[in-house]
Each structure stands twice: as C-alpha cells, then as structure tokens.
Amino acid sequence: QVQLVESGGGLVQTGGSLRLSCAASGRTFNINRMGWYRQAPGKQREFVASAINSGSTNYADSVKGRFTIARDNAKNTVYLQMNSLKPEDTAVYYCNANVYIITTRVNVELWGQGTLITVSS
C-alpha cells in the first residue's frame, strides 16, 4: 500500500510565502507523476501544478510565476513553493500522485489528506 503524507499548510498574509511537502511511502512502487490540486470553499477541486519523471512541469494559469513545483525522486517527495500569495489562493491543498504498483502491475491515482492554506488580506 502506498500513502501520501502532506505537510506545510497554515496561515499567511497576502504577499507571503509557504512551502508544501508531500512524501509517498510504501513498498514496491514507482511514481509516474506527482502534483497538487486545491479546493476552495464552495468550489470544485482544481489543478495547481504537476511534475512528471522527465522533469517537465505544468502549472495552472492562476499560479504561473508565483508557484514552483519540484520533486526529490530519491525521497519520493514533491514540494510546492508558493510565493506572492493572494487571498484567492485560500484553499485545501491536496497532493496527488500517479503511481505504478509493481506487485500488481497497476497504475493507481493517490491523494493526500489535504492541508489548509489561508491567506489573509
């Protein structure tokens, strides 16, 4: 079984910075892609950023130039550095990973437990 554990949420003022971390743990798996989604109150969950094994990254237009995603493949960890935060960034942030389970030869989509980020104006 593979699990994602997030850390790093909290309260920050407008213009501030935070860094989220998400580590995958378990046995016999390979990670294809890791990324982040968020869900603001009363809204649907939306894509934020992702990073695949080649190093290629992708960002939502709303966070380009402010957020940076990075992976540490040796630690099976993904980070989201968030700068110039705005009140509209307030949401629960979820780590996401597409993982290949070696023993079952199946790709699965995993989600972290979510971490709340509140940006005060």
Image (cartoon, rainbow, N blue to C red):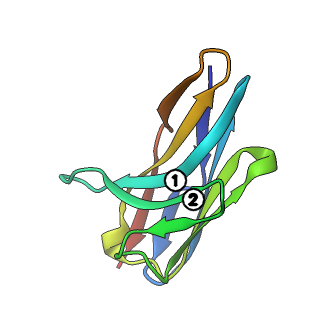
The residue closer to the viewer here, 109 or 118, is 109
Amino acid type shown at disc 1: Gly
Q: Quadrant of the C terminus?
A: bottom left
Q: Position of residue 42 (x, y in %)?
A: 18, 52
User: Vertically, is 98 above or below 101?
Assistant: below
The residue closer to the viewer here, 56 or 38, is 56
Which residue appears at 56% of the width and 75% of the height? Answer: 17
Mark toward the start of the polypeptide (2 vs 1): 1
Q: Which mark is residue 68?
A: none
Q: Position of residue 93 (x, y in %)?
A: 44, 53
Tell me which corner region of the image, top left, top right, bottom left or bottom right, holds residue 4.
Answer: top right
Judge left or right: residue 40 versus residue 4. left
Judge left or right: residue 29 versus residue 65. right
Tell me which corner region of the image, top left, top right, bottom left or bottom right, holds residue 59.
Answer: bottom left
Which residue appears at 20% of the width and 54% of the height? Answer: 43
Q: Quadrant of the N terminus?
A: top right
The residue closer to the viewer here, 99 or 39, is 99
Amino acid type shown at disc 2: Ala
User: Vertically, is 59 above or below 98?
Assistant: below
Residue that numbered label 2 is attached to: 51
Which residue appears at 49% of the width and 29% of the height? Answer: 108
Judge left or right: residue 103 versus residue 109. right
Residue that numbered label 1 is attached to: 35
Give the structural element (helix, strand or loop) at label 1. strand
Which residue appears at 65% of the width and 53% of the height? Answer: 53
Give the structural element (helix, strand or loop) at label 2. strand
Q: State if disc 1 and disc 2 touch (CB < 8 Å).
A: yes
Mark 2: give few (<14), some (14-19) or many (20+) Cα within 10 Å.
many
Q: Position of residue 119 (x, y in %)?
A: 40, 70
